[in-house]
Image (tube, rainbow, N blue to C red):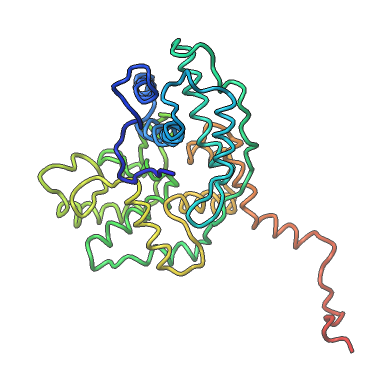
Amino acid sequence: MPKKGDGKPRHPHGDSADPNGMAALCQAYLTWLKVKNYSGVTVDRRLDLLNCFLRWADDRGLTKPGEVTKPILERYQRWLYAYRKPNGEPLAFATQINYLAPLRCWFKWLARQNHIVYNPASEIDLPKRPHTLPRNVMSAEEVEIVLSQPDLSDPLGVRDRAIMETLYSTAMRRFEAVNLILSDVDRSRGVVLIRAGKGQRDRVVPVGERAVGWIDKYMTQVRPKLLIGGQAGQTLFLTNLGEPFTLDRMSDMVAGYITAAEIGKKGSCHLFRHTAATLMLEAGADVRLIQVLLGHANLSTTQIYTQVSIKLLKDVHTATHPAKVDHSIPPPDAVN
């Protein structure tokens, strides 16, 4: 199953020369998404997910959308359910949904554009989406251990510290950090402008003094050394080649430091986002303000962090639950 950033060509799988074939019509759909102002990240992700189906269909001799029926799509859905990753694990139901939902959108578009007579995906039922909590959230002490991992005698270590401080302070998404430009950081006001975040929505978020200090250190001492032939433009964070980060490269960098910290938790850029939201809630921040910080369109998405933030509930539980330890009674192992 193809993964994002695996080096494969960035175009739909199949014979693009056939105007009525799946490859050409998939490309037309992706172009339509761009015209409708969907972000490049969204379009690329749709391509990756649709290509999985295009390869599956091509292996079974299906090259035109009109050849696809509801039973065929149900067969593809069963294939996703039975698929096993290299480690032997099945695809999570959330992942299966991620592969099926763009397929329903594409066939809906094909029917509306009169490329097919009817929409075979209109009655496909998606698996029930599980309501899972973030698996890992760092404590404030663990965050400091991770942040202390970069070698600050190395200019790239200063850059990496600045990136992680920014992720932690602003709780922004990985692609939002990759897309930051110089003018997005307003030091005087202590805020960062996030342009075209998820859903193509702009927002302004606060950034702490410590993060600003590391950004300044990076910009004055490191970034000028990374500029190569003006290739970087106004991009804030640059690689050692003077180029903007790719999403996978930033993830690998952050994940490496989290692993090196040996805190017993795995994750990457999103772990800082989860952690910032959870720790702020535990410190008394209003969930609606956290919603604005994270850029969630719906409060229900943010409320998952109220379930992760267990500290306040634990304090109340300790203070009010009747099953308390009576220190006048010896513990069970002390009774003869």
The image shows residue 136, relative to residue 124, as above or below, that is below
Residue 210: x %, y % from top left: 36, 56
Is residue 260 visible in the rendered image? The answer is yes
Name, please, the residue furthest toward the left. 229
The residue at 55%/39% (across/down) is 79
Decide if residue 100 is on the left or right side of residue 247: right
Name, please, the residue furthest toward the front. 61
The quadrant the N terminus occupies is top left
- Between 123 and 222, the one lying in front of the other is 123
Residue 130: x %, y % from top left: 63, 42
Name, please, the residue furthest toward the bottom. 336
Decide if residue 218 is on the left or right side of residue 107: left
Q: Quadrant of residue 47?
A: top left
- Between 120 and 202, the one lying in front of the other is 120
Q: Quadrant of residue 37?
A: top left
Is residue 186 visible in the rendered image? The answer is no
Decide if residue 124 is on the left or right side of residue 153: right
The residue at 45%/27% (across/down) is 62
Q: How many marks?
A: 0
Residue 260: x %, y % from top left: 40, 68
- Between 331 and 44, the one lying in front of the other is 44
The residue at 84%/65% (across/down) is 323
Q: Quadrant of residue 71?
A: top right
- Between 327 and 305, the one lying in front of the other is 305
The residue at 35%/19% (across/down) is 35
The image shows residue 129, relative to residue 31, as above or below, that is below
Residue 102: x %, y % from top left: 48, 29
The quadrant the C terminus occupies is bottom right
